[in-house]
Amino acid sequence: MTNLIPSELDGHGLRVAVLVARWYPEVTDRLRRGALKTLADAGIAEDDITVIEVPGAYELAQAATWVTRAGQADAVVALGCVVRGETPHFDHIARAAADGCLRAAQESGIPVGFGVITADTHEQAKARAADLDGGI
């Protein structure tokens, strides 16, 4: 017999930190709007949401670690965008962001949602963010 633990979208009383990378704002601004709408739809009060901007996707991990250690949030959402270029820089930034956010969640026990778009082109990134604009 399988035990099912249902997923509830009831966020009443939860405090959430939304980390937003400023690099590629035409993408991350859409992600931010989508996340804020989704949180509101889940019943999370506007006063219980803190938005923290960071320079780029690389800094999301450090911000996630800082927020989870501070104990001021019940959950964290990390939003950013990395677009592949002609050098291996893309791979390093994407991996550091993913590994760092995972580590922050594992060390703290606080969920860290990873909403970083990794795309081959700027057009792909904008198209993926457009799907999230206005909520999930």
Image (cartoon, rainbow, N blue to C red):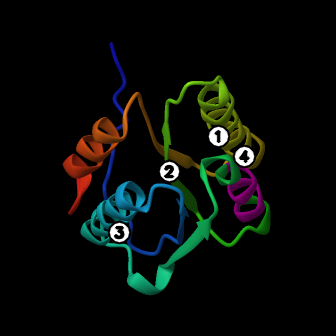
Residue on which the image places disc 4: 104
The quadrant the N terminus occupies is top left
Nearer to the camera, 46 or 34: 34
| Dot 4 amino acid type | Ala
Magenta-drawn segment: 61-67
Q: Main secondary structure of the magenta part?
A: helix
> Which is more foreground, mark 1 or mark 3?
1
Secondary structure type for disc 2: strand
| Dot 1 amino acid type | Ala
Q: Looking at the image, tell me whether mark 1 or mark 4 is earlier in sequence order.
A: 1
Q: Residues within 10 Å of mark 3 (few under 14, many from 20)?
A: many
Residue on which the image places disc 1: 97
Q: Residues within 10 Å of mark 1 (few under 14, many from 20)?
A: many
At x 20%, y 47%, the residue is 131
Residue on which the image places disc 3: 36
Residue sitting at the far bottom: 47
Q: Looking at the image, tell me whether mark 3 or mark 2 is earlier in sequence order.
A: 3
How far apart, in angstroms, are the residues tagged by discs 3 and 4? 22 Å
Say whether residue 69 is left or right of residue 61. right
- The quarter holding residue 74 reads bottom right
Q: Is residue 2 above or below residue 55?
A: above
x, y percent for residue 8? 32, 51
Look at the numbered discs 2 and 4 and tell me whether their residues touch, using CB distance below 8 Å: no
Residue on which the image places disc 2: 80
